[in-house]
């Protein structure tokens, strides 16, 4: 790598395996070391950006790419469009992977134009993300954050019949909008864990989820308990009207931008609970703040925000809102697994490996005791680029 033209603007980096043949850049330090070792074993020089700022600008990343780079692992906070894909292409790059399953920060058409593969990290975060949605549901139903603040403020002076009375989940209806991997996992947790009935809306039928709820209902009935039920709604409005707890899990695209707006909020029960662990712009956040102000019994649990990392004015003051900083996938196992999948996506394209045939079945890449399959776990534009599919 000697003799390269100097970067436009220096960006601090940490280098692993300086003599590796392929140059792979990660725009952030990522959990664990397996992802680094897997790249090094396959002759990669790994450069990790150590700049202190949280969100790198497009210019920062252009500098990181430099004039020779085979692949980049990036983050959902970065704007991967024409400028970055053309810079990566000029540097001889073949692959980019988001360390995330969502890739609404990536202009896939721009990547296609330059023949660059775009990876994401499905599956490994399904349960972890669903568990946070379930945590927010419980915290909102039982007013845990308000009660915690009350205790810390030294305001507890004895048990009272009306102190922090919330909602019982058992027997109520859970509504899921977007019953894909995460939405289905969340639905199962709420149905099985709290014996809630399910209503869901998705563009596609979730047969596995329906079968699960049917079987669980039969099991309960056989044991003398009230069975749980499910229904696939024909519109989102039906879910909003009928459910007591509603959790949003669709992808963010043109069809889901402001899916929940002033009108849809009005359609919900006055004491409903709304959870969002998908992407902030799925909710019109200004309308939500107004709704929270006018309906003190309505509660919300948010992991994501419309103008992340910022919140719309007034949201932070609302007692009926629980807000956490985009941590739904933040378990150690998941974050290390996401780093591994992202690294293997990039490595697979550099080595001309085929693409794994089923991105919902990524376990073989996560087993630390055996070498991963010679394939890229999940490339979202594999078809558009005509990439071969693994026969494994
Ligand atoms: N908060 C977090 O940290 C976090 C973590 C993981 C994923 N996510 C977000 O969750 C999203 C879902 O992840 P997944 O792995 O479950 O993806 P998935 O593709 O398995 O599921 C998405 C579902 O949304 C459905 N959908 C698409 N458009 C819709 C519409 N207009 N109305 C209703 N349903 C619609 C799809 O049919 C699909 O079933 C990701 O795209 C990402 O943005 C957030
Ligand atoms: O899309 C994703 O993967 C999340 O937002 C971060 O885990």
Image (cartoon, rainbow, N blue to C red):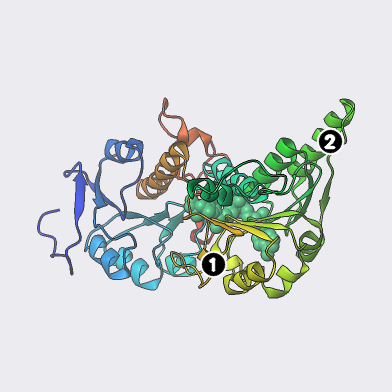
Give the residue number, with chain letter if any, for mark 2.
Answer: 217
Give the residue number, with chain letter if any, for mark 1.
Answer: 315
Q: Residue at x 43, y 38 (%)?
A: 332
Q: How many marks?
A: 2
Residue 205 in the image, given as x and y percentages of width and height: 76, 52
- Give residue 131's quadrant in the image: top right
Position of 85 with respect to 109 (left or right) is left
C-alpha gap between disc 2 and disc 1: 39 Å
Position of 191 with respect to 135 (left or right) is right
Q: Residue at x 70, y 42 (%)?
A: 190
Q: Which residue is nearer to you in this view: 296 or 49? A: 296
Q: Residue at x 83, y 29 (%)?
A: 219
Secondary structure under the numbered disc 2 in the rendered image: helix
On the question of residue 277 being in view, the answer is yes
Give the numbered dot on residue 303: none
Q: Residue at x 64, y 67 (%)?
A: 292
Position of 234 with respect to 90 (left or right) is right
Q: Which residue is nearer to you in this view: 380 or 152? A: 152
Asked if the beta carbon under badge 2 is closer than 8 A to the nearest atom of ligand 1, the reply is no
On the question of residue 101 being in view, the answer is no
Residue 13 in the image, given as x and y percentages of width and height: 20, 53
């Amino acid at each position: 790598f000697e003799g390269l033209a100097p970067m436009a603007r220096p960006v601090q980096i940490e280098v692993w395996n300086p003599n590796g043949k392929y140059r792979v850049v990660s725009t952030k330090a990522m959990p664990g070391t397996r992802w680094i070792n897997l790249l090094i074993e396959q002759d990669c020089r790994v450069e990790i950006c150590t700049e202190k700022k949280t969100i790198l600008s497009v210019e920062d990343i252009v500098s990181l790419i430099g004039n020779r780079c085979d692949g980049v692992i990036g983050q959902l906070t970065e704007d991967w469009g024409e400028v970055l894909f053309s810079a990566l292409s000029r540097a001889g790059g073949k692959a980019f992977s988001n360390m995330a399953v969502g890739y609404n920060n990536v202009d896939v058409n721009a990547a296609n134009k330059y023949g660059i593969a775009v990876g994401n990290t499905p599956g490994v975060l399904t349960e972890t993300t669903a568990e946070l949605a379930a945590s927010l549901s419980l915290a909102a139903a039982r007013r845990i954050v308000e009660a915690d603040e009350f205790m810390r403020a030294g305001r507890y002076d004895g048990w009272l019949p009306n102190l922090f009375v919330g909602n019982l989940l058992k027997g109520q209806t859970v509504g899921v909008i977007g019953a894909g991997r995460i939405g289905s996992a969340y639905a199962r947790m709420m149905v099985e864990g709290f014996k809630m009935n399910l209503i869901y809306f998705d563009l596609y039928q979730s047969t596995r989820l329906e079968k699960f709820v049917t079987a669980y209902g039969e099991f309960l009935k056989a044991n003398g308990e009230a069975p749980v039920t499910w229904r696939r709604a024909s519109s989102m409005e039906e879910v909003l009207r009928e459910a007591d707890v509603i959790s949003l899990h669709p992808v963010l695209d043109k069809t889901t931008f402001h899916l929940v707006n002033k009108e849809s909020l009005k359609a919900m029960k006055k004491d409903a609970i709304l959870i969002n662990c998908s992407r902030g712009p799925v909710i019109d956040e200004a309308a939500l703040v107004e709704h929270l102000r006018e309906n003190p019994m309505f509660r919300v649990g948010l992991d994501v925000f419309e103008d992340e990392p910022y919140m719309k004015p007034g949201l932070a003051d609302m007692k009926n809102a629980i807000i956490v900083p985009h941590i739904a996938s933040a378990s150690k196992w998941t974050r290390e697994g996401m780093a591994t999948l992202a690294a293997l996506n990039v490595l697979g394209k550099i080595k001309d490996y085929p693409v794994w045939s089923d991105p919902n079945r990524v376990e073989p890449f996560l087993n630390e005791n055996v070498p991963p399959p010679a394939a890229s776990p999940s490339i979202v534009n594999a078809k558009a680029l005509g990439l071969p599919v693994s026969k494994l």
